[in-house]
Image (spheres, grey):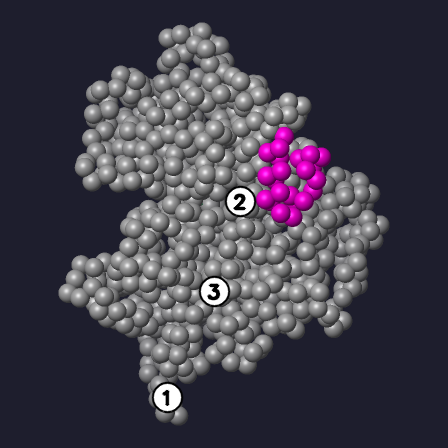
């Protein structure tokens, strides 16, 4: 496909304005212009995708379906243009049309269809699969409202709806012809016909799943993949009969009930609520997805026997687990397979990634609720469970505890992770440590039965977005040093290490960092009204708020430092700006208290003349992908301070690293691999190791000991009780002294010491710049292209589409021009 010139593109955009808004481009609003531009890009991508599809069909390429409740895409326009190599052309287009590309980028809302790491990872993997010419489709829900917008009012978090479809729907193309029906509730009726048993679900209520497709682009490649988002619709918009009888409201009820399914993304991570609506969401999207996968496979290959050879289905955490019994249901009930044959197909097709070891996040459903909502699926899960328990019993004879602990159904609960283990050919964790913990602890019993099923794939990030697009200053400079090879292969960043002793390079790196800090300082001034000094250390912790991530440890260190400065205003430290960003799950009381504490710290410290502006504290509202794109390039210090053993991987840590921030971290998740890549000289490690935490837990932990024996800890906790900015934080103080589940007090001294070391390192300008450079240089391993290749090799066994093979001319070529 030849590249369109700016002139041709202008014509197409003009055509879109006329067609969609009935006006010449000179008269449309900026929002309409934005839409016309996006629609143009969408058409270019769709044309490419169809050409890619023809190759896939001709080559009968195996493909992966990535099932995930969350895809945290962020903004798309900039990304697509970058990937297509059309940024310059569209800059010209915008100029011609009397606007700027930046202005267009600003209009686009973040597609916030995710909470945090798991959702962002799903988006990254779709993009990397595309970068590598693999065929992949993502499946999820088209939520009307994504992750809530966070407002901070006097330090308290408020949640506002995120109406992302307002300007975000331009990327979505409805595909009504691919609608599937999903059934809930009712009763089961058995029917024998032609010597075969059929199960009918009667008196159920039915919902139509209508797909909307989004293009996923890759960097300078021929591939374009798709993300399919399902929306729920009542089969009949409203019941005419009821309406005629005068029951107006009732006639609309069905519609409202159906549409409630995709209304909103659940905003809690690491804590399940067991709500019926969430179970409905899960079944809704996997049922539609599996039906769609089967239909396509039958169209392409004629029967489902070959499914495992041509299709890999990936379960992103347990949320899409129901695709296992749904596949069984279709194979048994619709396609007449025997149980054994159906199970063989399913178990050779599905694989599962675990993303958390937090017990409260491992999904369980009350058996009664499950049975009523999904009667046939329940039957099938019971059968899977029986067979699974028989296998457990054989391996652990007479060990009732082990059998019931590992069973899929026990004590009135259905445990999704255990169902995933039973059916998946491969199970992986997301960092070396996490995968080890799965084997040693969380899934230990099952691991002993099937050790070969377990593997590790350390997470990765879309480094072009985080480095080249978000930090053009650094990326362009890197290009002058090592060429542009790193844009295709992140490992080439290693070549930067050669320059670690070159002062002029280090000067330039720090100059770029400074410019990025000035930009962030401007953002902070505009949004928080706080003046921060771009010459101070920008020390940043941005991630979901959770006690295990220990934002509280960071806050306690700041309080301690503040008291030290009050005692001695001439304390010799580098000025520091502590920056936080974090959304709390709306029902997570303690998390909201911690946000309030951080906010109060800011109020008190930023307005205290005694400390001469040496430290400042800023809480950034509404942390999201597009804000991360401003924060990462401007950070000096990356706070990755979770209690060891609890952060499965972390991916923010990788984004900071590639932007040259130095990690202050525990030996947890992927921090360990960052440490291994960057070396001990270029990272600050502190705190108990995972095995030490285990030992402390075994021996019993008494946080009051630290309070009573450590005067600094005592002073800080007493300070919480006395009040920060006039607000007392007794509940936080109590929880620290009485339980301290996440061992904040135990790691406090070690953290403070590491912070002092960091301060010293920063005083040596070139030492710090070298550390920063080495972090960027060694970050290549954390590319999601590498991670996806590992999934392909170890789990999905895909081959890329071959672009060197000739292809028959595709009919749809040149549609872009025709539809202007
Ligand atoms: C409410 C149910 C629930 C439970 C868990 C919702 C969401 C989750 C996710 C598994 C939480 C999550 O995002 N985990 C993060 O996954 C990232 C990608 O692998 C890791 O880098 C993070 O360490 C992990 O916390």
Dot 3: what SS? strand
Question: Where is mark 2, residue-wise?
Answer: 781
Q: Is residue 177 above or below residue 752?
A: below
Is the magenta region chiefly helix, strand or loop? helix
* Left or right placement of residue 14 versus residue 182 in this view: right
Earlier-in-chain disc, 1 versus 2:
1
> Considering depth in this image, is 776 or 819 the residue closer to the camera?
776
Residue 522 seen: no
Q: Residue furthest right?
A: 7
Q: Residues within 10 Å of mark 1 (few under 14, many from 20)?
A: few
Q: Is residue 522 above or below residue 177?
A: above
CA–CA distance between discs 2 and 3? 25 Å
Q: Is residue 96 magenta?
A: no
Dot 2: what SS? helix
Q: Is residue 7 above or below residue 631?
A: below
Question: Which stretch appears magenta?
Answer: 478-499
Q: Residue furthest bottom?
A: 194
Earlier-in-chain disc, 3 versus 1:
1
Question: Where is mark 3, residue-wise?
Answer: 313
Q: Do the numbered discs 1 and 2 sit on residues whose CB atoms are within 8 Å? A: no
Residue at left 60%, top 28%? 500
Q: Residues within 10 Å of mark 3 (few under 14, many from 20)?
A: many
Residue 559, position as x, y percentages in the image: 37, 20
Question: Where is mark 1, residue-wise?
Answer: 196
């Amino acid at each position: 496909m030849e590249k369109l010139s700016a002139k041709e593109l202008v014509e197409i955009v003009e055509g879109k304005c006329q067609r969609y808004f009935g006006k010449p481009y000179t008269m449309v609003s900026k929002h309409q212009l934005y839409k016309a531009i996006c629609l143009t890009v969408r058409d270019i991508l769709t044309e490419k995708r169809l050409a890619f599809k023809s190759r896939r069909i001709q080559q009968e390429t195996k493909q992966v379906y990535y099932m995930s409740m969350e895809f945290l895409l962020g903004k798309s326009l900039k990304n697509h243009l970058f990937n297509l190599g059309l940024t310059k052309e569209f800059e010209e287009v915008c100029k011609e049309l009397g606007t700027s590309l930046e202005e267009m980028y600003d209009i686009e809302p973040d597609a916030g269809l995710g909470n945090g790491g798991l959702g962002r990872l799903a988006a990254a993997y779709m993009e990397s699969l595309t970068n590598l010419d693999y065929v992949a489709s993502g499946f999820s829900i088209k939520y009307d409202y994504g992750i809530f917008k966070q407002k901070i009012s006097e330090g308290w978090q408020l949640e506002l709806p995120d109406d992302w479809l307002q300007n975000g729907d331009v990327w979505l193309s409805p595909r009504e012809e691919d609608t599937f029906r999903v059934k809930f509730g009712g009763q089961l009726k058995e029917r024998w016909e032609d010597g075969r048993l059929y199960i009918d679900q009667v008196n159920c209520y039915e919902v139509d799943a209508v797909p909307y497709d989004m293009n996923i682009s890759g960097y300078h490649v021929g591939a374009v993949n798709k993300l399919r988002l399902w929306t729920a619709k009542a089969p009949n918009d409203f019941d005419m009969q009821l309406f005629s009888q005068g029951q107006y409201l009732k006639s609309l009820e069905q519609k409202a009930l159906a549409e409630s399914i995709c209304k909103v993304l659940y905003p809690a991570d690491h804590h399940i609520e067991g709500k019926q609506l969430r179970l409905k969401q899960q079944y809704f999207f996997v049922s539609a997805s599996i039906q769609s996968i089967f239909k396509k496979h039958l169209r392409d290959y004629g029967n489902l026997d070959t499914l495992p050879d041509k299709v890999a289905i990936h379960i992103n955490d347990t949320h899409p687990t129901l695709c296992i019994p749904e596949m069984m249901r279709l194979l048994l009930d619709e396609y007449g397979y025997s149980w054994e044959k159906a199970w063989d197909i399913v178990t050779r097709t599905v694989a599962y990634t675990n993303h958390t070891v937090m017990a409260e996040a491992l999904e369980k459903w009350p058996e009664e609720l499950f049975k009523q909502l999904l009667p046939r699926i329940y039957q099938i899960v019971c059968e899977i469970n029986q067979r699974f328990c028989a296998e457990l019993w054989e391996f652990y004879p007479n060990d009732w505890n082990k059998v019931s602990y590992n069973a899929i159904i026990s004590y009135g609960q259905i445990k999704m992770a255990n169902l995933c283990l039973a059916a998946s050919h491969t199970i992986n964790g997301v960092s070396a440590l996490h995968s080890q913990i799965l084997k040693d602890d969380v899934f230990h019993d099952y691991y002993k039965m099937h050790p070969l099923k377990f593997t590790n794939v350390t997470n990765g990030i879309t480094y072009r977005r985080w480095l080249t697009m978000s930090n053009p200053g650094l990326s362009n400079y890197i290009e002058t040093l090592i060429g542009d090879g790193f844009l295709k292969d992140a490992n080439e960043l290693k070549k930067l290490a050669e320059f670690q002793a070159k002062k002029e390079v280090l000067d330039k790196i720090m100059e770029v960092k400074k410019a990025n800090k000035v930009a962030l300082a401007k953002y902070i001034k505009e949004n928080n009204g706080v003046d921060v000094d771009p010459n101070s250390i920008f020390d940043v912790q941005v991630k979901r708020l959770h006690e295990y991530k220990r934002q509280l440890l960071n806050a306690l260190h700041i309080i301690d430092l503040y008291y030290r400065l009050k005692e001695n205003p001439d304390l010799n430290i580098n000025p520091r700006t502590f920056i936080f960003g974090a959304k709390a799950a709306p029902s997570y009381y303690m998390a909201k208290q911690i946000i309030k504490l951080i906010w109060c710290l800011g109020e008190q410290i930023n307005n205290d003349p005694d400390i001469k502006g040496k430290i400042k504290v800023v809480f950034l509202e509404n942390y999201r992908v597009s804000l991360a794109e401003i924060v990462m390039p401007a950070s000096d210090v990356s706070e990755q301070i979770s209690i060891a053993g609890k952060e499965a991987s972390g991916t923010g840590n990788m984004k900071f690293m590639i932007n040259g921030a130095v990690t202050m971290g525990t030996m947890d998740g992927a921090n360990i691999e960052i440490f291994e890549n960057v070396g001990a000289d270029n990272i600050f490690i502190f705190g108990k190791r995972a095995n030490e935490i285990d030992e402390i837990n075994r021996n019993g932990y008494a946080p009051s000991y630290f309070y009573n024996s450590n005067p600094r800890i005592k002073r800080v906790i007493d300070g919480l009780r006395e009040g920060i900015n006039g607000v007392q934080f007794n509940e936080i103080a109590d929880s620290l002294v009485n339980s301290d589940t996440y061992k904040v007090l135990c790691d406090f001294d070690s953290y403070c010491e590491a912070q002092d070391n960091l301060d010293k390192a920063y005083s040596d300008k070139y030492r710090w710049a070298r550390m920063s450079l080495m972090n960027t240089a060694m970050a290549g391993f954390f590319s999601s292209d590498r991670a996806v290749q590992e999934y392909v090799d170890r789990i999905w066994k895909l081959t890329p589409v071959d672009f060197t093979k000739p292809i028959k001319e595709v009919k749809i070529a040149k549609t872009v021009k025709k539809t202007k």
